[in-house]
Image (tube, rainbow, N blue to C red):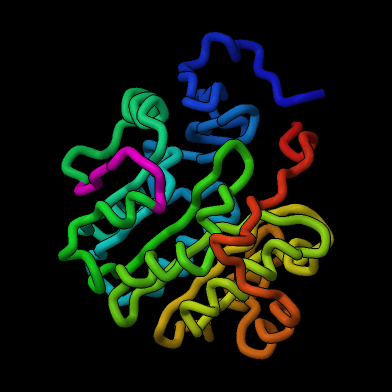
Amino acid sequence: MGRQRRDERDEPQARLSDGSIARIAPSEFGSGWELIVDGTPQSHVDLDDPTHLHFEYVARMGAVIDQLPPGPLTAVHLGGGGLTIPRYIDATRPGSRQQVVELEQALVDLVRAQLPLPRGAAIRIRIGDAREGLGRLPSAMTGQVDLLVSDVYSGAQTPAHLTTVEFYRAAAALLAPHGVLLVNVADGAGLAFARRQVATIRDVLPHVVVLAEVQVLKGRRFGNLVVAASAAPLPTEWLPRLMAAGPHPAKVAEGREIDEFVRGAIPATDADATASPKPSASLFER
């Protein structure tokens, strides 16, 4: 049986430009709220505790962010969703300046109304395509961004134009010398898309690690992989123990493991890129 709630029709919702429905629902797994788009959970937000990162891949992003140099961050987020990571950074690194690029005005309006941002948070939301939005950011940000998060989905897929060498070059141009790119990559059996994505990102930023649940990293089930990349070496010695301690054992692939992971994968370009694979409709059933 699909993901249904007794009062689903009464939940706050908005129709997006592609006809899909976004809605805000109480979380079925403890405190907080979920943003659900066309049946796919997109974000979990805990207004009482913005440091509560419920989704596993988001918690892994948070683990990487925690290891960035102390103090406020200059951050760019491609894909807004429920603004979970911007809220996390605002709570853990007061004074951070953040820019969010989100395609759907209706989604932003829904989230702002139902899940308001903390008062005083320096989080600016820009409406538009993520890739085009990179070029519309203030020129003073070029080479100054500490963190750039790419977590863009149309329905349950990442659009092809946000998976290419050309896209990642534009993103990398914003990064400070030790800035970090974080990308959420969803893939299933065989990991053909994920392997190509890692090869593509490494073609632009040479230092790459991949964080994922063990069975996902082995290509045995559909799930999310977090790719962290930088022009400078990443601080990774603490990650394996931290990942293994989670409720679902996970690991970090780096160095030679990345070499093996991308072996034979050809970086994606604007001429030949494809969207991420669409998960089975049963993946989000409860």
Position above or below: 253 against 111: below
Q: How many marks?
A: 0
- Identified at 24% across, 55% down, the residue is 137
Q: Quadrant of residue 60?
A: bottom right
Q: Position of residue 30 (x, y in %)?
A: 57, 36
Q: Is residue 112 above or below residue 84?
A: above
**Was residue 127 drawn as part of the magenta stretch in this picture?**
yes
User: In the picture provided, is 172 more to the left or to the right than 219?
Assistant: left
Q: Is residue 186 visible?
A: yes
- The x and y percentages for residue 190 are 82, 64
Relative side of 269 to 52, left or right? right
Looking at the figure, which quarter contains the C terminus?
top right
Q: How far across and down, in percent of the image, does residue 282 sit? A: 80, 35
Magenta range is 122-131
Residue in view at x 67 percent, y 74 percent: 266
Residue at 76 percent of width and 40 percent of height: 283
**As displayed, is residue 132 above or below residue 126?**
below
Image coordinates for residue 64, horizontal then vertical, percent: 46, 69
Examine the structure image and report whether residue 260 is included in the region drawn in magenta: no
Q: Classify residue 191 by image quadrant.
A: bottom right
In the image, what residue occupies the spot 57% across and 72% down? 200
Residue 138 versus residue 270: which sits nearer the camera? 270
Residue 66 shows up from this direction: no
Q: Is residue 201 above or below residue 128?
A: below
Report the quarter where the N terminus lies: top right
Instruction: Say which of 116 and 156 sits in front.
Output: 156
